């Protein structure tokens, strides 16, 4: 139907057009319209707003239950998730949704609760959607307000009170402060999400959980949930990384195709990004800007050093030996038992086998027996002379020969630095098709920031012995050649 020019100028026409756009359009459309109500800066649209909006819409539809959103600072993530989305969904669901929002600082929830309330109480909103969303509170708190349809919004802090409330949406927005990343705080945050927030679901079958944060540490809340699985991961780094494309159940979420392309150059240009990178340093920039809490090249071990692969075990191995790092508490929070088997041909070292599991004492003995049977030529078995290693050796030494307890010199980092040149020079080869290869490379490149280091310890111990043995062999051969030349 054609609309006359005079009619399009009537205020009612624009109101009805916006109402229709929200009914038929996207969350991004609503963000564009409502932006001036809460922000003084000019709205600059970008594809990442569409990507975040599409994933939040999927939650509203019930197509996604658990979502992790990793975005760098300055991306309007709190506005999108904690301000515009709940108001938009209330329009879609006539104000029925119940929300719990949490942040590391209660002040952040007061800020975003007020922003959402400003939209709801604005004349602009009331004229368009008062029939769908009406607040019951005459003087609502910015942290807690209700709709006449039974919906409500409740804001709190991480580890703050939520007793007695059960919500349809559980949202945490920046659960930990960047300057307060400690093991205790990381553990407390995960415990809070599993325990306190885990019991706040209105319906375990339909309640959605959203973690929205910039990455700070490999063991932060997002990292732990990513490891466990069951979450869609919307990871949009400041600079595009071709080797880490973002693909979710909705498809390719990041349309950038050029390495290093910025997330939103109109809002945060190259000069500003460069300044941020210098301020944060390589580790901070990798986490907070790239959403990957390990630099792309790694810390001590660079990923480019871990790209020497073999498809078949060399038939002419000159030596084969084992290296073990042992803990056998058998608990979910204990360290891993890690065993590696190494072979050498000249100056090149081959990782032949790896086991890395949480094992009980009995299971550890069984695994060691299995490895010894699989590699009968690996006569030497190196075991670190602390933790549970001596108990394993004491139990098996009459059954299996070749044990050597090792007292490593220096700390873990110094030992890793000592053997890193072997990787850098291309003298360490990895089995291309090993099922544990990706995990092994991730732990090495993540060290010493990664939550576990058992594979690094076993590798350092094994290669240190192999390197010293090879040096002794070379020295002996030179002596022999020198003696022969004198005759």
Image (cartoon, rainbow, N blue to C red):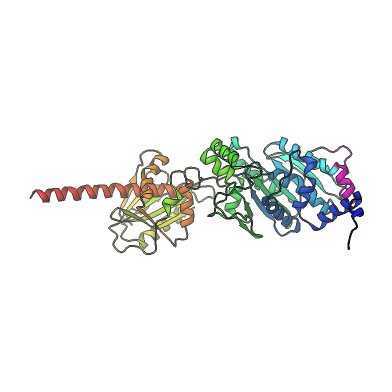
Query: Is residue 134 in the magenta section?
Result: yes
Query: Is residue 281 in the magenta section?
Result: no
- Which quadrant does the N terminus fall into? bottom right
Could you tell me which residue is drawn at 72 percent across and 35 percent down?
A: 107
Residue 318 to residue 70: above or below: below
Q: Which of the 4 quarters of the picture holds residue 103? A: top right
- Residue 148 vs residue 70: left or right? right
- Residue 479 vs residue 173: left or right? left
Residue 141 at least partly seen: yes
Characterize the magenta stretch by its predominant secondary structure: loop
Task: Give x and y (percent) for residue 52.
Answer: 69, 51
The range drawn in magenta is 121-140
- Of residue 391 and residue 294, the one placed in the foreground of this image is 294
- Of residue 216 and residue 96, the one placed in the foreground of this image is 216
Kindly give the residue lying farthest to the left in the view shown.
Answer: 487
Could you tell me which residue is drawn at 35 percent across and 42 percent down?
A: 407
Task: Give x and y (percent) for residue 123.
Answer: 88, 43
């Amino acid at each position: 139907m054609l609309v006359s020019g005079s009619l399009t100028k009537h205020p009612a026409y624009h109101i009805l057009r916006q109402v229709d756009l929200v009914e038929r359009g996207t969350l991004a459309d609503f963000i564009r319209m409502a932006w001036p109500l809460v922000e003084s800066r000019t709205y600059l649209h970008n594809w990442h707003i569409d990507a975040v909006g599409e994933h939040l819409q999927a939650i509203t539809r019930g197509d996604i239950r658990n979502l992790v959103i990793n975005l760098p600072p300055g991306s309007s993530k709190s506005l999108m998730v904690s301000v515009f989305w709940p108001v938009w969904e209330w329009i879609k669901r006539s104000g029925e949704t119940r929300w719990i929002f949490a942040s590391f600082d209660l002040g952040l929830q007061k800020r975003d609760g007020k922003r959402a309330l400003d939209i709801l109480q604005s004349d602009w909103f009331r004229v368009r959607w008062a029939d769908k969303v009406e607040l019951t509170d005459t003087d609502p708190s910015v942290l807690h307000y209700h709709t006449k349809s039974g919906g409500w919004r409740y804001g709190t802090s991480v580890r703050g009170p939520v007793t007695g409330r059960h919500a349809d949406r559980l949202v945490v927005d920046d659960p930990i402060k960047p300057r307060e990343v400690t093991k205790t705080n990381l553990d407390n945050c995960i415990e809070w999400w599993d325990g306190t927030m885990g019991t706040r679901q209105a319906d375990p079958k339909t309640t959605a959980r959203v973690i929205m944060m910039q990455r700070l540490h490999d063991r932060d809340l997002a990292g732990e949930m990513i490891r466990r699985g069951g979450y869609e991961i919307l990871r949009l780094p400041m600079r595009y990384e071709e080797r880490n494309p973002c693909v979710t159940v909705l498809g390719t979420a990041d349309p950038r195709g050029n390495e290093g392309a910025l997330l939103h150059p109109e809002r945060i240009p190259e000069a500003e990004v460069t300044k941020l990178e210098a301020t944060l340093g390589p580790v901070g920039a990798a986490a907070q800007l790239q959403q990957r809490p390990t630099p792309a090249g790694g810390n001590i071990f660079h990923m480019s050093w871990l790209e020497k692969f073999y498809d078949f075990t060399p038939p002419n191995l000159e030596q084969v030996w084992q290296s073990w790092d042992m803990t056998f508490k058998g608990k979910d929070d204990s360290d891993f038992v890690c065993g590696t088997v190494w072979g050498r041909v000249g100056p090149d070292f081959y990782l032949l086998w790896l086991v890395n599991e949480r094992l009980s004492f009995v299971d550890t003995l069984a695994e060691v027996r299995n490895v010894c049977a699989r590699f009968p030529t690996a006569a030497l078995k190196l075991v670190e002379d602390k933790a549970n290693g001596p108990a394993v050796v004491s139990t098996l030494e009459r059954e299996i020969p070749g044990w050597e307890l090792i007292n490593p010199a220096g700390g873990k980092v110094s030992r890793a630095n000592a053997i890193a040149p072997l990787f850098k020079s291309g003298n360490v080869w990895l089995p291309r098709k090993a099922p544990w290869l990706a995990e092994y490379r991730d732990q090495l490149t993540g060290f010493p920031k990664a939550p576990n280091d058992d594979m690094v310890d076993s590798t350092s111990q094994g290669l240190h012995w192999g390197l010293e043995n090879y040096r002794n062999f070379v020295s002996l051969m030179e002596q022999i050649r020198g003696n022969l030349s004198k005759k």
